[in-house]
Amino acid sequence: MIGLRIAAAAFLVLIVTVAQAATPELRGIRIGVHEDYTRVVVEFSQEAATKVDLRDAYNRLWITGEEVTMPDEIIPTPRGLVKATQITSINPLIFVLDLVQESRILKTFTIAPREGYGFRLVVDIAPAVEDQKTSSPAPVSLPAVVPPPPPLLPAKTAPPVVPPLSSAPAASSDAGPTPLRPPRFAPGPSAPQSPAWQEPVWQERVLVVIDAGHGGRDPGAQGFDGSQEKDIVLAATKIISEVMTASGRYEVVLTRESDRYIGLRERVEKARSADADIFISLHADSLHDNSIYGVHVYTLTDEAGDEEAQQLLGQEDTQNVMADEALENNDPMLAWILLDLTQRATMHDSRRLAYHIVRQLQERVPMTRNAHRHAGFMVLRAVDVPSVLIELGFLSNPRDVRALNDPAYISRIAQGLVQALDQYVQETNG
């Protein structure tokens, strides 16, 4: 009997050891530039199942796969067709590479471990053929990027609510969005009652966390004139913060106020720990085609939202976003339902916020065609904080670079953001 127990214990140790060894370790990511293509090499400690595909109009390369471990943070240097990279998840692996132009995958292959190297995934990408390239954006004088409100609504009354996510039940036409927490920014007794829009009055100031992208050892996109994204967006963040604070309606917290590196998760957690009402991440883009210019806004994709909810379920900070009864009763199904509802409500609010931002900015500054886009960026994944990422312009375009270095231009963006936030807050609690 004792021998059987010893054998069983040894078998369990073997199972645990095999399970631990079965998780590949992400060792490194290298990007190399060749005459006609750019090569991306992802190295693992052992064989790992991966999938490679191009998304978002062939401007973004996704490498996904099974769960991996990553002992040290890996930040590959963008070069060639790759302008920026981010590892948005390691369970499962989601590695996203932003490309400078529409591209195609030439070939994908793997190399078995040898000569001190681990298992390697190799992806070669090249520019798309000429007739697939993105055309330049339309002049600003073309029709509005955002469709106008339905004709039955007055032009300056309550802006139309963006339709709910396709997978969520449709809301009734007379029901406004429900705040996730007690409304910090409910209108005060002196709030205007006129149907026309007027400057709002809040009982308490709305807390906005503004994130200047990149920083420190991560410079972000490179401008045609040598300027760096991290410096451009930090300067813009400070101006926008001043304008928002001066309105008297917004309290602003910055994720960074100097040239220092902050991890993506840390940026999101800073917003959540501050109990932020809104999170805005500022960035600037760069392309090979220097004729592209203008501002565009990102919100989270449905797929990325589902992944984040699944990862959050069971973690310690789940209690910050779910009702106490679900946790006290240890009801996984109820917990999952509440978490999923919270995630979807936040994504819906984020898209409403993006709608108002685009609507206001297009009256003040040039916008790209398709100005509201969707992506799985890590900084958009706060489950209970409405979040948007704003690309302020293209550092590859001389016009945008001049504008982004002009405080008056950034102030126009800031005024548009204040107006957008005003409308979003009124709509949320109206």
Image: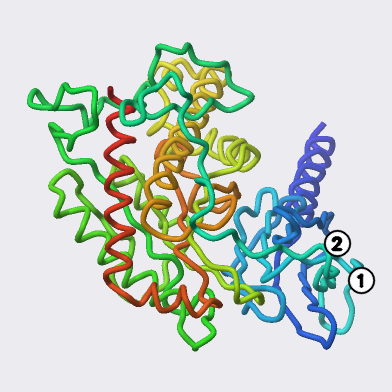
Q: Residue at x 34, y 35 (%)?
A: 424
**Residue beneath the point at 57% across and 73% down:** 286
Q: Position of residue 161 (x, y in %)?
A: 44, 27
Comparing 119 with 136, the one in front is: 136
Could you tell whether 349 is left or right of 257 in the image? right
Query: How many numbered marks appear?
Result: 2
Residue 47 is marked as 2
Q: CA distance from mark 2 to mark 1?
A: 8 Å
**Residue under the point 83% across and 79% down:** 37
Q: Which structural element holds mark 2? A: loop
- 373 vs 186: above or below: below
- Name the secondary structure under disc 1: loop
Indicate the position of residue 6 as horizontal and vertical percent values.
Answer: 79, 41
Q: Nearer the viewer, residue 124 or 163?
A: 163
> At label 2, which amino acid type do we have?
Glu
Q: Is residue 212 left or right of residue 373?
A: left
Q: Earlier in the sequence, mark 2 or mark 1?
A: 2
Q: Which mark is residue 322?
A: none
Vertical order, 282 against 80 (above or below): above
| Pointer 1 residue | 112
Q: Amino acid at mark 1?
A: Ala
Q: Are marks 2 and 1 in contact (CB under 8 Å)?
A: yes
Where's the C terminus, which quadrant?
A: top left
Residue 121 visible to an observer of this rendering: no
Crowding near pointer 1: few (<14 within 10 Å), some, many (20+)? few
74 lies left or right of 62? left
